[in-house]
C-alpha cells in the first residue's frame, strides 16, 4: 500500500499502468501486429509491442481484451498507446513488456496473478482494484513534484510471499565496466523452512521518467515487470528456518547486468527456494548507470537545518552574573560527538556549498552552556530560580567544543549561513491564529533583526537574513503576508504547496516570483520527502540514497542543455541517520563526472525563473497541519505577557535584568519547534506566564483582615513588601474607604523599597461613627499613565471609641447645671454687698412668710389657701421682668 501522499505522480500514471496491464507480451520470434507501435526511445533499439502475430498464441480471450479496452476508454486511457487520453504529462511512453523465457517464472507468477501473461479480465480487475485502493492511477499532483514518494523495496511478507528481502548496501553509481555489489538480508517470516534458498538479481529495466521511478516504488509484490532472474547472479543462502535470517552479498558487473545505455535502472533482488517455481520475496532499488555526461549539471541547493526546541527559560539565578537556567539538560547529549547536532556538524562540514539554516536561539543557548549554568528541577517551571530548585548543568565542555566545530564548519567549503528569525517563530500559526494581535508585528520584526545579529556575533561569519521557512514549507497567502512582516523577501516552500501543472513535461527551476517583492524557492517535494523520516537503518538509508540518485539523474536528463536548479528541503529536526543518507547521496551524485553540482541557496534563488512554473500561492492551508498549530488562545496569552512585563519594568531599578530574558522567552513560546511537541510547548508558555506573575506579586501589600481603630482620630498602618532581588520605585500606595462619610484616610504615599525589604506606611484616619468600614489598599504606578499594580487588598476597619448622641445630651446637661450654680453664686455675692447678713435665700423667704401670717391673724383676716400675695421681692422680680421684657427683641404680634 502506498503512502497517502503518493496517490498518483501526475506522469500519466493511469494510461501507463492500465495499458501495461493489458498489453499483450512479446514472444520470441513474434512480429509486431498492426495497431501496436514500436517503443522508439532515444539511444535504444525499438522494441515491438504486439498483440500477437504469426506463430504467436495469446493466452487471453478477445472478448475480455475488448472489455478491458472499454474500461480503459471509460477511464480516459487510449489502449495501445501507453498514454492517458490527456497525454502522458512527462512526454514518456509506457515501457514495453520484456520477453520472458523461463517457463517456471511464467507458471509461478501467473499462479499468483502477477504476470502480464494472465487474462485481460484479470488485468481489468487489477485496474479496478487499484482505483478502489487509491494507488498511483489518479493524481492531481504535478509531473515533477509528487506529494511524497513511494518507497521501493519495502515489501511486506504474506502467506504467498513468506520471505522479506532487504538491500542494505549497493554500489551507488555504476560506471563503464564497473563492478556492482549488492548486500542485504533475507528473513523467513513464514511457518515452514525455506529449503536451499538462494537470491538472484533480476534483469534491470530502464526507467526513463520520474513516473517510471514512482511506479516501481509502488509495487508491493513480485511482478513480471521487475525482469527475470539472471543466472550469473544466483547466490545460495542455504536452508532458512522460520524466523531465521541470512545475509547475502551479490557481486556482479555492468556487463552481466546487461546495462548498455546510460540512465536509471530498476534493481530488484528476489529469493527462491529449491522449487524455484516463483519468487518468495523481493526487494527493489535503483541503479544509476552513469556514462560520460554531455549536458549541464543540475544545481542543487541543500538546506542543512541546525535547530532545536527552546531550552533557555526566562529565569536566571540571583546575583550579578545572572547564571542562565535551562528547562532540562537533554541538549548536552545532542551536542556530543554521537548526538544528533554533533553528527550534523561533522557531516555537514565536508559538503561543498552547503546552506546552513540556523536558529540563533540555539546559538545563544549553547553559548550560555559554555559557562556555568543551572537546570530546572521537574515541576518548577514557573518558580524563581534558586539553588534548591535547580541542578548544576553538565554540558559546558561539550557545548564549547560543538560551538567551535560549528564556527569552523560554516566558514569552509563555500558554505552559506541563513539565520532564521530568533527562536524560529511559527509563521503559519501566527498567520492563521495570531495576526492582528497587539504587538505581534513588532515582535516578529525584532525577532528577525535579533536573529541575524545573534548569528553573526556567535559565528563570526557573514549571515543571510530575510529568509522565511514556514512549517514543512507549506505556504499559503496568509503565511506569505506574515513572512513579509519579518522582512523576508525569500520564502522557502515545499512543492506540495505549489504543485506544477500536469501538462509540464519536465521539472522546472526552484525559484519563482510570487509577488509583493517576494521570491519563493520551491523544493522538489518528491526528493525532499525521501529524507523526512528518521532513516535509522542501513536499508532505509540505502533506499533513500538510491532513489535520490535516480530522481536527480532523471531530472538532469530531461533537458540536458538547460541549466537546471533544485532545492532539497529536509525537516527542521533532521536526524543523524537521515543526514548521513543525504550527505552520501549528494556525494555520489556530485562525484567526478556526476550530474549534480552542489550550490548555495542564493545561487538557486537567483536562477532564471521558468515561465511555465507554478507561481500561484494557494489560499488554503492543509487541514492536517492546522491541528498542530499554536492556538489563538496560546498566542494571545503570549502577547499578553508584554503588558505585564511593561508594568514590571516600570517599577524596577534594574529593568535590563528582566527585559532581555523575558523578550526572548516570549518569542520562544511561539517557536515552530513546538509543532509535534504540544505538551512541552504548553508547559514552557505556562512557565513564562507563571514566573512573570510571581515576579509581579513579589511587590505587594500583605493581606489583612480586620483592623481596630480606637478613637475617632487615629492612624492606619499599611505595610508593603518587596521580595525581589533589586530595589523598586515609581509606586504609590493608595488607601480608600468604601464609606468616606463614616471613615476617611489621608493622601497616597510614595513607595520606594530596597531589595527584599518591607516598610510600613502611616495613614491618618478620621472616623465619624462606630462600626465596621471596608477599606482597600492598592499599589499604583506613577507617571502620566498611572495604572494599578498587582492585586488590591481589601480589609475591614472596626471603629470602637467614637461618642454617641446620648453622651452629647448628658454633657450638655452637666454644662447647664454648672452654669446655674455660677449664677446663684454671683447673686449671693451681690446681696451680701448690699448689707444683708443672712445670705440664705430660703430661710429669709420662710421668715417673711411667717411674719405675714402673724399680721393677718391680728387683723382677723385668715389666709386663703392657694393664693399668695406678692412680696417685695416678688414685686421687684416682676418689675425686673418688665424691664427685661421692654428691652427684649419682639418676636410675636
Image: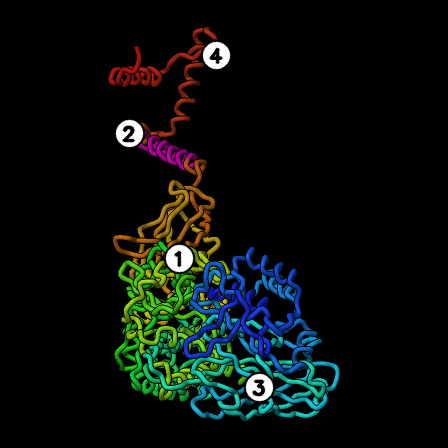
Q: Position of residue 349 (x, y in %)?
A: 36, 86
Callout 4 crowding tier (Cα within 10 Å): few <14, some 14–19, many ≥20? few
Q: Residue furthest front?
A: 54
Q: Which residue is mark 1?
A: 618
Which element type, helix, strand or loop, lies under badge 2? helix
Q: Which residue is mark 4?
A: 866
Q: Nearer the viewer, residue 574 or 327?
A: 574
Which range of residues does the magenta coloring cover?
A: 809-827
Cα–Cα span, label 4 and label 1:
123 Å
Tell me the mark number nearer the camera, choosing from 4 and 1: 1
Sequence order check: which comes first, mark 2 or mark 1?
1
Sequence order check: which comes first, mark 4 or mark 1?
1
Magenta-colored segment: predominant secondary structure: helix
Residue 825 versus residue 462 in the image, above or below: above
Which element type, helix, strand or loop, lies under badge 3? strand
Tell me the mark number nearer the camera, choosing from 1 and 3: 3
Cα–Cα span, label 4 and label 2:
32 Å
Residue at 40% of width from left, 55% of height from top?
A: 619
> Can residue 814 be found in the magenta stretch?
yes
Cα–Cα span, label 3 and label 2:
152 Å
Q: Are marks 4 and 3 in contact (CB under 8 Å)?
A: no
The numbered disc on residue 830 is 2
Q: Position of residue 237 (x, y in %)?
A: 65, 92
Task: State whether residue 340 appears in this view.
Answer: no
Q: Which residue is mark 3?
A: 201
Amino acid at each position: 500500500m502506498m503512502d497517502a501522499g503518493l496517490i498518483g505522480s501526475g506522469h500519466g500514471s493511469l494510461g501507463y499502468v492500465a495499458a501495461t496491464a493489458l498489453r499483450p507480451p512479446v514472444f520470441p520470434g513474434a512480429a509486431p501486429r498492426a495497431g501496436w507501435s514500436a517503443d522508439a526511445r532515444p539511444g535504444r533499439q525499438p522494441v515491438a509491442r504486439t498483440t500477437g502475430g504469426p506463430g504467436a498464441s495469446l493466452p487471453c480471450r478477445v472478448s475480455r481484451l475488448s472489455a478491458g479496452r472499454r474500461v480503459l476508454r471509460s477511464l480516459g486511457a487510449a489502449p495501445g498507446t501507453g498514454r492517458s487520453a490527456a497525454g502522458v504529462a512527462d512526454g514518456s511512453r509506457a515501457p514495453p513488456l520484456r520477453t520472458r523465457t523461463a517457463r517456471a517464472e511464467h507458471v509461478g507468477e501467473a499462479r499468483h496473478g502477477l504476470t502480464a501473461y494472465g487474462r485481460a479480465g484479470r488485468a481489468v480487475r487489477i485496474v479496478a482494484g487499484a482505483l478502489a485502493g487509491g494507488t498511483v492511477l489518479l493524481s492531481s499532483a504535478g509531473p515533477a513534484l509528487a506529494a511524497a514518494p513511494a518507497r521501493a523495496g519495502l515489501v511486506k511478507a504474506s502467506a504467498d510471499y513468506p520471505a522479506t528481502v532487504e538491500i542494505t548496501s549497493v554500489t551507488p553509481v555504476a560506471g563503464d565496466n564497473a563492478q556492482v555489489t549488492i548486500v542485504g538480508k533475507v528473513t523467513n517470516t513464514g511457518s515452514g523452512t525455506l529449503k536451499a534458498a538462494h537470491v538472484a538479481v533480476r534483469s534491470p529495466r530502464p526507467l526513463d521518467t520520474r513516473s517510471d521511478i514512482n511506479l516501481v516504488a509502488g509495487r508491493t509484490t513480485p511482478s513480471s515487470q521487475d525482469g527475470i532472474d539472471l543466472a550469473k547472479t544466483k547466490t545460495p543462502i542455504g536452508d532458512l528456518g522460520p524466523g531465521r535470517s541470512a545475509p547475502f552479498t551479490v557481486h556482479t558487473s555492468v556487463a552481466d547486468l546487461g546495462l548498455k545505455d546510460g540512465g536509471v535502472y530498476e534493481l530488484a533482488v528476489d529469493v527462491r527456494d529449491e522449487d524455484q517455481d516463483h519468487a518468495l520475496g523481493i526487494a527493489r532499488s535503483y541503479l544509476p548507470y552513469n556514462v560520460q555526461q554531455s549536458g549541464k549539471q543540475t544545481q542543487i541547493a541543500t538546506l542543512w537545518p541546525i535547530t532545536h526546541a527552546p531550552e533557555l527559560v526566562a529565569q536566571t539565578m540571583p546575583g550579578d552574573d545572572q547564571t542562565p537556567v535551562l528547562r532540562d539538560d537533554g541538549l548536552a547529549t545532542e551536542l556530543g560527538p554521537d548526538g544528533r547536532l554533533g553528527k550534523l556538524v561533522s557531516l555537514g562540514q565536508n559538503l561543498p556549498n552547503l546552506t546552513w539554516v540556523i536558529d540563533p536561539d540555539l546559538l545563544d543557548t549553547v553559548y550560555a552552556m559554555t559557562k556555568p549554568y543551572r537546570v530546572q528541577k521537574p515541576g518548577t517551571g514557573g518558580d524563581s530560580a534558586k539553588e534548591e530548585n535547580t541542578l548544576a548543568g553538565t554540558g559546558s565542555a561539550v557545548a564549547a567544543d560543538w560551538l567551535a566545530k560549528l564556527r569552523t564548519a560554516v566558514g569552509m567549503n563555500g558554505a552559506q549561513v541563513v539565520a532564521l528569525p530568533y527562536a524560529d517563530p511559527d509563521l503559519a500559526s501566527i498567520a492563521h491564529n495570531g495576526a492582528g494581535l497587539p504587538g505581534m508585528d513588532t515582535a516578529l520584526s525584532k525577532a528577525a533583526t535579533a536573529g541575524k545579529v545573534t548569528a553573526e556575533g556567535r559565528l563570526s561569519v557573514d549571515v543571510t537574513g530575510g529568509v522565511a521557512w514556514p512549517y514543512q514549507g507549506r505556504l499559503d497567502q496568509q503565511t506569505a503576508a506574515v513572512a513579509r512582516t519579518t522582512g523576508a523577501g525569500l520564502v522557502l516552500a515545499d512543492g506540495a504547496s505549489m504543485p506544477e501543472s500536469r501538462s509540464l513535461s519536465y521539472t522546472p527551476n526552484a525559484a519563482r516570483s510570487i509577488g509583493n517583492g517576494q521570491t519563493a524557492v520551491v523544493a522538489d517535494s518528491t526528493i525532499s520527502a525521501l529524507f523526512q523520516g528518521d532513516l535509522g537503518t542501513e536499508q532505509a538509508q540505502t533506499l533513500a540514497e538510491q532513489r535520490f540518485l535516480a530522481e536527480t539523474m532523471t531530472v538532469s536528463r530531461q533537458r540536458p542543455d538547460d541549466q537546471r536548479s533544485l532545492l532539497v528541503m529536509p525537516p527542521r529536526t533532521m536526524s543523524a541517520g537521515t543526514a548521513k543518507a543525504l550527505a552520501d547521496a549528494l556525494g555520489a551524485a556530485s562525484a567526478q563526472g556526476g550530474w549534480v553540482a552542489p550550490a548555495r541557496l542564493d545561487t538557486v534563488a537567483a536562477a532564471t525563473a521558468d515561465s511555465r512554473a507554478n507561481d500561484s500561492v494557494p489560499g488554503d492551508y492543509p487541514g492536517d497541519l492546522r491541528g498542530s498549530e499554536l492556538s489563538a488562545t496560546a498566542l494571545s496569552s503570549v502577547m499578553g505577557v508584554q503588558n505585564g512585563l511593561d508594568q514590571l519594568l516600570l517599577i524596577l531599578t534594574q529593568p535590563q535584568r528582566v527585559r532581555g530574558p523575558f523578550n526572548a522567552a516570549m518569542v520562544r513560546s511561539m517557536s515552530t519547534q513546538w509543532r509535534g511537541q504540544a505538551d512541552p510547548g504548553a508547559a514552557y508558555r505556562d512557565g513564562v506566564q507563571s514566573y512573570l506573575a510571581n515576579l509581579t506579586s513579589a511587590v505587594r501589600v500583605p493581606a489583612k483582615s480586620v483592623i481596630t481603630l480606637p478613637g475617632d482620630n487615629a492612624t492606619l498602618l499599611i505595610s508593603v513588601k518587596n521580595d525581589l532581588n533589586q530595589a523598586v520605585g515609581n509606586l504609590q500606595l493608595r488607601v480608600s474607604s468604601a464609606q468616606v462619610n463614616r471613615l476617611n484616610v489621608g493622601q497616597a504615599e510614595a513607595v520606594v523599597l530596597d531589595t527584599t525589604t518591607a516598610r510600613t506606611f502611616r495613614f491618618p484616619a478620621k472616623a465619624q461613627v462606630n462600626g465596621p468600614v471596608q477599606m482597600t489598599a492598592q499599589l499604583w504606578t506613577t507617571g502620566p499613565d498611572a495604572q494599578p499594580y498587582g492585586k488590591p487588598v481589601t480589609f475591614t476597619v472596626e471603629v470602637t471609641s467614637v461618642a454617641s448622641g446620648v453622651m452629647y445630651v448628658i454633657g450638655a446637661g452637666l454644662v447647664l447645671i454648672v452654669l446655674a450654680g455660677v449664677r446663684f453664686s454671683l447673686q449671693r455675692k451681690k446681696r451680701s454687698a448690699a448689707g444683708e447678713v443672712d445670705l440664705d435665700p430660703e430661710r429669709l423667704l420662710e421668715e417673711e412668710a411667717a411674719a405675714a401670717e402673724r399680721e393677718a391673724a391680728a387683723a382677723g383676716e385668715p389666709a386663703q389657701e392657694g393664693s399668695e400675695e406678692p412680696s417685695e421681692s416678688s414685686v421687684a422680680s416682676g418689675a425686673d421682668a418688665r424691664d427685661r421684657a421692654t428691652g427684649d427683641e419682639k418676636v410675636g404680634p
